[in-house]
Amino acid sequence: MSQPKIKYDEKSDSLTVSFETGVPATGIELTDQILLRVNLAEHKAISIVFFDYSILTQKTNLGIRSFPLTRLKALSEEFQEMVIEILLKQPVCKYLSVSDYTPSIRKTQPIISIKPFLVAV
């Protein structure tokens, strides 16, 4: 696998991490600001697009921001499992961290955060 191409667009404050180019892909909205593009046939990531990138990566007083993956609930269980599988493996796991928020002993909510990585802006 070649090095991902990272492109930041200052005007739209969006950052795209492309793992492959010229490959058909389906976009899956993980949050309002994070779009994962995948090759459905091969179950692999093609790119990640971060909208409002400067806001997403702002640190808080308690550290990095996390975002609920509430959009996954709209997908079938099989599709959810495929997306989680893609999020947990290379190359995506180099850029995104997935975990569970547990508001109660019987309820969990998958959440995502952006791992710090160097971007030449």
Image (cartoon, rainbow, N blue to C red):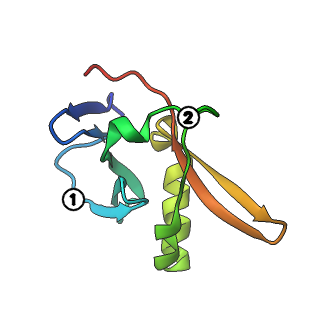
Where is the N terminus found, in terms of image quarters?
A: top left
- Residue at image coords 55%, 34%: 60
Residue at the disc numbered 2 = 60
Q: Is residue 75 visible?
A: no
| Type of amino acid under label 2 | Thr
- Judged from the image, the secondary structure of the residue bearing numbered disc 1 is loop
Mark carried by residue 57? none
Q: Amino acid at mark 1?
A: Pro
- Quadrant holding the C terminus: top left
User: What residue do we see at 55% from left, 57% from top?
Assistant: 85
- According to the picture, the residue beneath numbered tag 1 turns out to be 24
* Cα distance in 3D space between marks 1 and 2: 37 Å
Residue 55 sits in quarter: top left
Q: Is residue 25 positioned above or below 19 on the image? A: below
Q: Earlier in the sequence, mark 1 or mark 2?
A: 1
SS for callout 2:
loop
Give left or right: position of 64 versus 7: right
- The image position of residue 100, as x and y in percent, is 68, 56
- Residue 8: x, y in percent? 23, 32
Q: Nearer the viewer, residue 39 or 120?
A: 120
Q: x and y percent of residue 69 in the render?
A: 52, 61
Q: Nearer the viewer, residue 19 or 62?
A: 62
